[in-house]
């Protein structure tokens, strides 16, 4: 099934992965996201928490953390099916709001 079929929107949902250098769990979770079959649905930005004192304090060892439009949708270890189950409803909400009309999904 084409991932766009669940919404019909072409806006790419902004997602942030909070990570750090050498985080093998972060790499595993990026692979799970790829297996979720939602390529082209989101625009992923990776942020190294160790490069920002406030982020390092906020997240500590609690990574990876994935945020969609500022809301945490998953953190730690999760299978592709869980990512997909959380991403789709969160993306629907984002697309129905301000993000749906934004060019390329940028807000």
Image (spheres, rainbow, N blue to C red):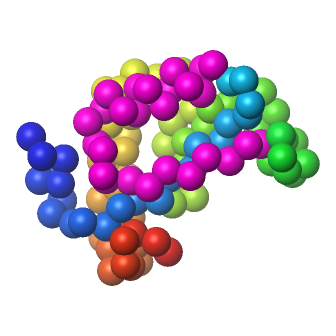
Against 68, residue 74 (above or below) is above
Q: Quadrant of residue 100?
A: bottom left
x, y percent for residue 53: 90, 48
> Is residue 25 in view?
yes
In the depicted structure, whether residue 27 falls above or below residue 100: above
Which residues are drawn in magenta?
A: 24-49
Depth check: give the residue in front, 39 or 80: 39
Residue at figure coordinates x 40%, y 21% from the top left: 79
> Which residue is at a point 31% across and 53% down the rendered structure image?
41
The question of residue 18 being in magenta is answered with no
Q: Is residue 95 above or below residue 23?
A: below
Number of marks: 0
Q: Is residue 82 visible?
A: no
The residue at 30%/44% (across/down) is 39
* Left/right of residue 99 with respect to residue 6 in the rendered view: right
Farthest-out residue, right: 53
102 left or right of 9 in image: right
Residue 41 falls within the magenta-colored stretch: yes
Query: Where does the image place residue 23, in percent across and percent down from the top left?
Result: 68, 24
Q: Is residue 42 left or right of residue 14?
A: left
Q: Is residue 57 above or below residue 12?
A: above
Determine the residue located farthest toward the front in the rendered image: 22
- Image coordinates of residue 66 in percent, x first then y, are 55, 42
Q: Write the residue at 40% across / 59% down.
A: 13
- Location of the N terminus by quadrant is top left
């Amino acid at each position: 099934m084409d991932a766009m079929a669940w919404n019909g929107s072409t806006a790419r949902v902004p997602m942030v992965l909070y990570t750090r250098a050498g985080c093998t769990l972060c790499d595993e979770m990026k692979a799970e996201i790829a297996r979720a079959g939602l390529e082209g649905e989101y625009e992923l930005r990776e942020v190294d928490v160790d490069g920002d004192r406030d982020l390092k304090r906020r997240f500590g060892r609690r990574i990876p953390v994935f945020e969609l439009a500022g809301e945490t949708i998953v953190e730690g270890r999760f299978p592709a099916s869980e990512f997909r189950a959380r991403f789709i409803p969160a993306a629907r909400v984002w697309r129905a709001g301000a993000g749906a009309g934004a060019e390329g999904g940028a807000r």
